[in-house]
Image (cartoon, rainbow, N blue to C red):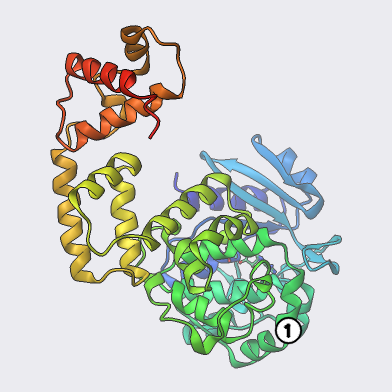
Amino acid sequence: MDPCQAALSIVNALEEAGFQAYLVGGCVRDRLLGREPEDYDVCTDARPEQIQTLFPRTIATGIRHGTVTVIAGGHPVEVTTFRVEGAYRDGRRPSHVRFVRRVEEDLARRDFTINAMAVDRRGRLIDPFGGQGDLKRRVIRTVGAADDRFREDALRMVRAIRLAAQLEFTLHPETEEAIRRMAPDLARLSVERVVQELEKIWKTRRSSKAIASLFRLGMMDHLPPFRRWELPSSACLSPLTVLDEAPSRRMRWALLLHLCGQKPEEAARRLRELRLPRRDVEEIGRLYRSAASWPPILTEEEGKRRIFRDGIRFCREALELSQRLGAIDAEERLGQSEALNRWSDEMPIRRMGELAVNGKDLIDATGRPSGPWVGHTLERLADAVILGRLANDHQQLIEEGVRIGRDTTADP
Ligand code: ATP
Ligand code: MG
């Protein structure tokens, strides 16, 4: 059973139990466009308790807001009771919802016409706001008066930009004008909700267009956390198209920092402000710093040391980013990329774990108590091995290690 069949089986079961039920939202839109939906959503006049009784496997995802996740054929499908929303307290979450009887009322609370369509099990389309026409014209237009809809939930402005990039649509002129007017309302959004949309923007092939719109419509000046950054004016932005060619989300985040005029030294702080997971803060920061300081001429020594320290995959990524940052040109990158591959193949060891001695060997051989000298000695031995000055041979390394250890305290 594929996810679509799973969702349809739920619609069928609800109808057979005497309820109304429809596929709704993004999945209807994507299927009309011939795109593979991310996920399938079902809406119904059944109440959450009734949904839970009807299906054996459910998860109480957001009972208060009317949402139950039903597992059908191994696929989770969100099933939501027809509802309208109360005021959005602080522009984040509706303070309350009210269940309603008619699907049209539920569709009216949705953000854009193309997202406000439902389809029943016989394939009958419910489209009260001209969603199909807007799909044909490839425009993003709010359901109802744009200013009001953005006042209710400012995230819809960011979703408009994200959807336009994802579907390669344009904004309806009225929707675009409303964004310009309502942009100050973005300040109330939580960083998490903003970043979630940015992550979706990174998955599109038109990231640059979306980021350009955020600047052009004056949204960046108000969006958390960017509103607190010192941003370049739209006129001074370097070409954003580098974003579209970047192969990973990590690289896109690093490029965004660069395009927003944030120095590598500030990267960690900025990434923390974006509330990215700690691992991303560390890795994206490291990537950005490494790329920004990447040398136009890479010597064999430095190249091999970088490969040993950071790994070949990281080096390839940093090299690529450094070209996108403009630190090196395409020709330099090509030459270096070939050299890095060659050096990596030549290196007898690529990780400390591959060195033919370890700390315990050194302590046993010297009889000295453990201390910082052990790590320093290992580093010097590894360095000599990767540069081809010593063989990765246990006996030879022990002898050299003892000598280094005796010679000095082996502190560099
Ligand atoms: P995606 O392809 O990313 O899944 P989607 O349109 O399905 O896009 P979701 O966030 O999954 O987006 O939301 C599902 C549906 O819920 C939307 O199609 C829309 O009808 C409605 N919706 C989501 N967020 C909002 C919002 N902030 N305001 C109004 N309606 C919304
Ligand atoms: Mg969806």
Query: Does residue 102 appear anywhere in the picture?
Result: yes
- Residue identifier under label 1: 182
Q: Position of residue 343 (x, y in %)?
A: 16, 45
Q: Position of residue 227 (x, y in %)?
A: 68, 73
Q: Residue at (21%, 35%) from the top-left corner?
A: 386
In the shown orientation, is residue 86 left or right of residue 290?
Answer: right
Identify which amino acid the numbered label 1 is placed on: Met
Query: Does residue 111 appear anywhere in the picture?
Result: no
Q: Residue at (35%, 24%) from the top-left corner?
A: 408
Q: Is residue 31 above or below residue 7?
A: below
* The quarter of the picture showing ligand 1: bottom right
Q: Is residue 192 above or below residue 158?
A: above
Front position in the image: 333 or 4? 333
- Callout 1: 10 Å neighbours few (<14), some, many (20+)? some
Q: Is mark 1 within 8 Å of ligand 1?
A: no
Q: Which residue is situated farthest in the front direction here?
A: 407
Quadrant where the N terminus lies? top left
Location of residue 385 (image quadrant): top left
Q: Position of residue 370 (x, y in %)?
A: 45, 15
Quadrant where the C terminus lies? top left
